[in-house]
């Protein structure tokens, strides 16, 4: 799905280049720059991100929910892997392992619920800017600073996830996803209680 968004994001930039737009060759490097002086690749990435945002804005509430849960699961798995490698506290290492297991399982349940919907809903787990920044901060953090950052991020992420699933379980428009959300609510609440206690 990301490749499709990237291709859609590239089309306007390529059309501009073909029409002799304001593209100039940078004589000091082999990179191409466009109006703002950023490498062309940066503009393509921005265009692709804009397309993801535009596509999400046009998505149904059920699709938005599936996308948000998918992204939350993906973030939790990646953060959990980092915790297993980098956390100093054994409790956080164990919690990270639990997050990888539970959120991989959650993704499978989400996909199964979406497949039963009519029409089928396939999650697009594109991370938010906040989730990307959180993972980057964890990659850079070491020692006690990692433990502090991981715990704080986990509390915040699970509070947001809890609100997300509670809201959809209460007022969602796709029965299969409502059922998934109701079941996920208990698991997310247990995760939040556990991380707060560490």
Image (tube, rainbow, N blue to C red):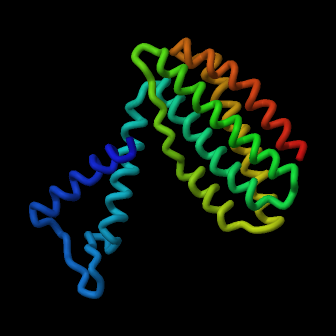
Relative to 68, 164 lies left or right: right
Quadrant showing the N terminus: top left
Q: Residue at x 72, y 41 (%)?
A: 99
Relative to 90, 24 lies left or right: left
Whether residue 51 is situated above or below residue 116 in the rendered picture: below
Relative to 164, 20 lies left or right: left
97 vs 124, nearest the viewer: 97
Q: Position of residue 185 (x, y in %)?
A: 71, 25
Examine the image and state in which quarter residue 136 appears. Answer: bottom right
Q: Position of residue 95 (x, y in %)?
A: 80, 45
Q: Residue at x 69, y 20 (%)?
A: 183
Q: Residue furthest bottom?
A: 28
Q: Residue at x 49, y 23 (%)?
A: 62
Q: Position of residue 112 (x, y in %)?
A: 54, 22
Whether residue 19 is situated above or below residue 113 in the rendered picture: below
Examine the image and state in which quarter residue 41 appears. Answer: bottom left
Q: Position of residue 115 (x, y in %)?
A: 47, 20
Number of numbered discs: 0
Q: Residue furthest right?
A: 197
């Amino acid at each position: 799905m990301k490749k499709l968004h990237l291709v859609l994001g590239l089309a306007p930039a390529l059309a501009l280049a073909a029409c002799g737009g304001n593209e100039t060759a940078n004589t000091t490097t082999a990179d191409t720059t466009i109006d703002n002086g950023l490498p062309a690749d940066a503009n393509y990435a921005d265009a692709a991100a804009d397309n993801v945002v535009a596509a999400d804005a046009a998505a149904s509430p059920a699709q938005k929910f599936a996308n948000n849960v998918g992204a939350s699961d993906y973030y939790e798995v990646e953060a959990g892997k980092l915790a297993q490698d980098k956390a100093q506290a054994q409790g956080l290492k164990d919690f990270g392992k639990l997050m990888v297991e539970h959120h991989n399982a959650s993704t499978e349940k989400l996909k199964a619920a979406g497949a039963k919907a009519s029409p089928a809903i396939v999650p697009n787990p594109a991370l938010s800017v906040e989730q990307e920044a959180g993972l980057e901060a964890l990659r850079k953090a070491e020692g006690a600073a990692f433990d502090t950052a991981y715990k704080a991020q986990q509390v915040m992420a699970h509070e947001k996830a809890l609100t997300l699933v509670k809201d959809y379980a209460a007022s969602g428009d796709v029965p299969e996803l409502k059922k998934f959300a109701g079941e996920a609510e208990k698991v997310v609440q247990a995760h939040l209680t556990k991380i707060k206690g560490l």
